[in-house]
Structures are given as structure tokens and as C-alpha cells.
Image (spheres, rainbow, N blue to C red):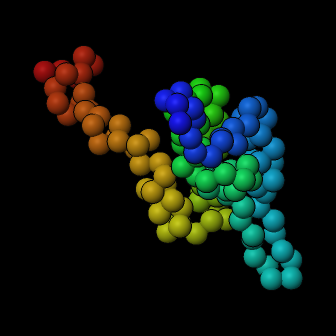
Amino acid sequence: PSITQKRGRPTKYVSGAKMLLETYVDTCIDVYEVATRRWHVRLPTIEGFALYLGVHRDTLYTWAKKSPEYEYALERLMSIQFIRLLNGGLSGRYRPWLVILMLRRNHWKRFTWARDWVNPHTNGTCKCCPK
């Protein structure tokens, strides 16, 4: 085999990530079943998006590294998931312990700013407080 010859399985790369993501998110609707008086939650996830496209989760991450289109799509998916978790937790639709677990697992980077933030009122750098 020549050095330039490609080996391995060909990619299933699909263009149009934004449209595909919007279609997938539209299918992720929470449904209330009257008979059981329970919500059936369909939270959008990266794993669910990969399943929707018929590829493995790692394939999506690989595409995101190579394509800004997929990088944007995965960031948007995580933002949608974050908002749905937050709103579902605050409204009482989702169980609080599950919301906390999912936020810690998938969105912990969004909260690291709180750990690193320094309050200007307590460290003496505030301009409005008398010294």
C-alpha cells in the first residue's frame, strides 16, 4: 500500500450540523402522561444527538475538533441542555438531586468562575467602600 492511501473505515460525516441539531432538539420534548401522572423527560444530550445521526459520541467530538460547524452545534446543544435542566429544576418538573448531578457532570466548567471570583468589597479593592 502506498503512503497516501487512506486506511480504515470512511467517515459518515454529514454537513448541515445546525439544521440537524435543530431537528434533533425539536424531537426532545417532555411529555406528560395523564394515566401515570408522570413526565417522560427527553432531555437533549450529546449521546442522543449521536444516536440520532447514527454515529458514536466520540465521532461527534472528532468532527467538532475538525469542523467549527460541529463545534458550534455541540456548544449550542450543551447550552440548550443547561437551560432545560435549570428551568426544569426551578419549576419542580425535574428532581433536584438529578438536576444537581447532571449540572455537575456536564456543566461544571460554567461554575468555575464562581470559585475564582474575588469579591471587591471583602478584599479592599472596592472604590465605593471607605478605607
Residue farthest front in this picture: 1
Residue farthest left in this picture: 131
Is 74 placed above or below 90 here?
above
Q: What residue do we see at 58% from left, 69% from top? A: 95
- Image coordinates of residue 51 in percent, x first then y, are 70, 56
- Image coordinates of residue 129 in percent, x first then y, are 23, 23
Q: Can residue 76 be seen?
A: no
Q: What residue do we see at 62% from left, 65% from top? A: 94
Q: What residue do we see at 24% from left, 16% from top? A: 127
- Image coordinates of residue 33 in percent, x first then y, are 84, 74
Q: What residue do we see at 80% from left, 83% from top? A: 36
- Say which of 32 and 79 sits in front: 79
Residue farthest right in this picture: 35
Is 28 placed above or below 70 here?
below
Number of numbered discs overlaid on the protein picture: 0
Residue farthest bottom in this picture: 36
**Toward which corner of the image does residue 76 lie, by quadrant?**
top right
- Image coordinates of residue 62 in percent, x first then y, are 54, 40
Q: Can residue 101 be seen?
A: yes
- Say which of 122 and 53 sits in front: 53
- The reply, left or right, for residue 97 in relation to residue 74 is left
Give the position of the C terminus as an image quadrant: top left
- Say which of 48 and 120 sits in front: 48
Is 31 placed above or below 2 here?
below
- Say which of 29 and 93 sits in front: 29
